[in-house]
Amino acid sequence: MTVPDPDNLTRHIAQQITLLNEYLAIARPQQAARILARVLDPEDGVFGGLTALMATGSRFAQDRASAGVLPPEAWLALGRAANELNDIGLDLDDHVEDLHRLSQAPTAAPVPPVASALVARKHR
């Protein structure tokens, strides 16, 4: 197996994420839901991969900080990033099924908006 050049690989991944973001911005609701569900998939989604990458980076930084090559703050920042992403991922896991359901919903006439708990109204 040939090991890819890490600079080219990271540049390629960043470009692919940019393209996915551009597609998401113009996608129909079902397509957008499908994209988000796949990105957030806890088993093999992009979000979980990024979280694992930050955890690996934190372990690398810990080793380098212990050797005095990196400041401890770099290790702490990467560890904090990994922990925050993990926590966010756990919060989002609850909604992946909702996104899957929306991505499978038949195309129908738009449903009129309904007030939700997220809508705050001022009464004077």
Image: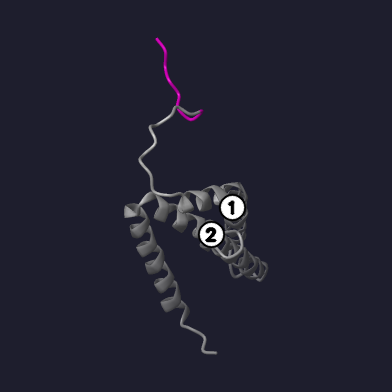
Q: Position of residue 28 (x, y in %)?
A: 35, 52
Asked if residue 91 is positioned above or below residue 18 in the image, the reply reads above
Q: Position of residue 5 (x, y in %)?
A: 46, 82
Q: Amino acid at mark 2?
A: Phe
Residue at image point 59% right, 52% down: 89
Q: What is the secondary structure assignment of the residue under circle 2?
A: helix
30 relative to 71, above or below: above
Q: Position of residue 4 (x, y in %)?
A: 48, 83
- Mark 1 or mark 2: name the one nearer the start of the chain: 2
**Residue 59: mark:** none
**Callout count:** 2
Kindly report the distance in space between the C-alpha atoms of the residues bearing marks 1 and 2: 7 Å
- Residue at coordinates 42% horizontally, 13% vertically from top-left? 123
Residue 116 shown left or right of residue 55 in the figure: left
- x, y percent for residue 100: 52, 53
**In the rendered structure, are the residues bearing label 1 and label 2 in contact, judged by CB atoms less than 8 Å apart?**
yes
For the residue pair 57 and 45, the one nearer the viewer reads as 45
Apparent side of residue 21 relative to residue 40 in the rendered image (left or right): left
**Is disc 1 surrounded by few (<14), some (14 to 19) or many (20+) residues within 10 Å?**
some
Q: Which residues are magenta?
A: 117-124
* Image quadrant occupied by the N terminus: bottom right
- Of 47 and 73, nearer the camera is 47
Residue type marked 1? Gly
Looking at the image, the residue that sits furthest to the bottom is 1
Which residue appears at 60% of the width and 51% of the height? 93
Secondary structure of residue under mark 1: helix
Which residue position holds label 2? Answer: 47
Q: Which residue is mark 1?
A: 89
Type of secondary structure dominating the magenta stretch: loop
